[in-house]
Image (cartoon, grey):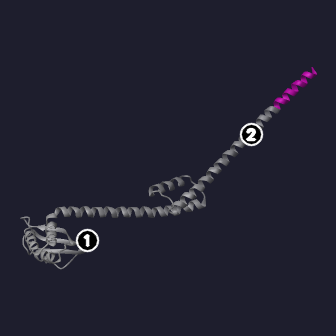
Amino acid sequence: MKNTNQFRLASRFLLLMLMAALVLGGTTGCKSKKKIAREKAAAEYAARVEQAKKDLTAILNDATDWSLAEKEARVKTIKSWNLQDEEVLKLIDQVEDKLARERADALRKAEEERLKKAEEERNKAKATKYSDVETALLSVAAAPDLATANAKINQALQLFATPDAPVLIIISQDGGFNDYDRPTTIRHYLEYLKDQKVYRNVVEQVKYDANGKIIELELIKK
């Protein structure tokens, strides 16, 4: 009987010890997992800080082949990490200022290109619209001899209502205002082209009468 009781006490003791070990082991395991998670999070944070510094510095020093849109997207991603590193925050401010200037410069260049293209299209339209006048003026300047030049002058004058039709030559433009050279007539201008043998202007505007004859010619220097 005594041995039986001792056995039962020993069994209970062993069971309690086993339960305690399990409890202690579980607690230790939970603490280890939390520690590992903290260490992992810290390592990831440090890696992002390092990557952010690397990318931001590269952008700041023009050491990437990224487009402006790609650089802006990268900064947006870095900001989404919510890093509280002082150096990273300072770099973000510097890079954002730089990209803002780049964006403004890109917009300015795009507008300049748009205006240039629009001007080229207008000049092309003018050249097509006034091609008969342009051809007449060029033919006088390019005439190989005096007789041919005189013949071309007579042909060109057929486009005009009178040989005294005024010719205005724009020498500069500023703020929507034109500065003109001394006025002349179409006959005098054609004689000038015959003598100089070069045509350096472009037709800017032509005014016609009811019969379709030119009553005023406006040129602009190339």
Q: Amino acid at mark 1?
A: Gly
Which residue sits at x=84%, y=30%?
Answer: 14
Q: Is residue 97 left or right of residue 8?
A: left
Q: Would you name the residue on which mark 1 appears?
A: 176
Foreground residue among 111 and 35? 111
> Residue 202 location, x and y as percent?
20, 69
Task: Please tell me whether residue 127 belongs to the stretch shown in magenta.
Answer: no
Q: Element at badge 2?
A: helix
Q: Which residues are magenta?
A: 1-16
Question: Can residue 83 be seen?
Answer: no
Q: Main structural element of the magenta stretch: helix, strand or loop?
A: helix
> Residue 113 location, x and y as percent?
33, 62
Residue found at the very far top of the displayed protein: 1
Q: Amino acid at mark 2?
A: Thr
Q: Name the quadrant of the C terminus.
A: bottom left
Q: Would you name the residue on which mark 2 appears?
A: 27
Which residue sits at x=14%, y=74%?
Answer: 167
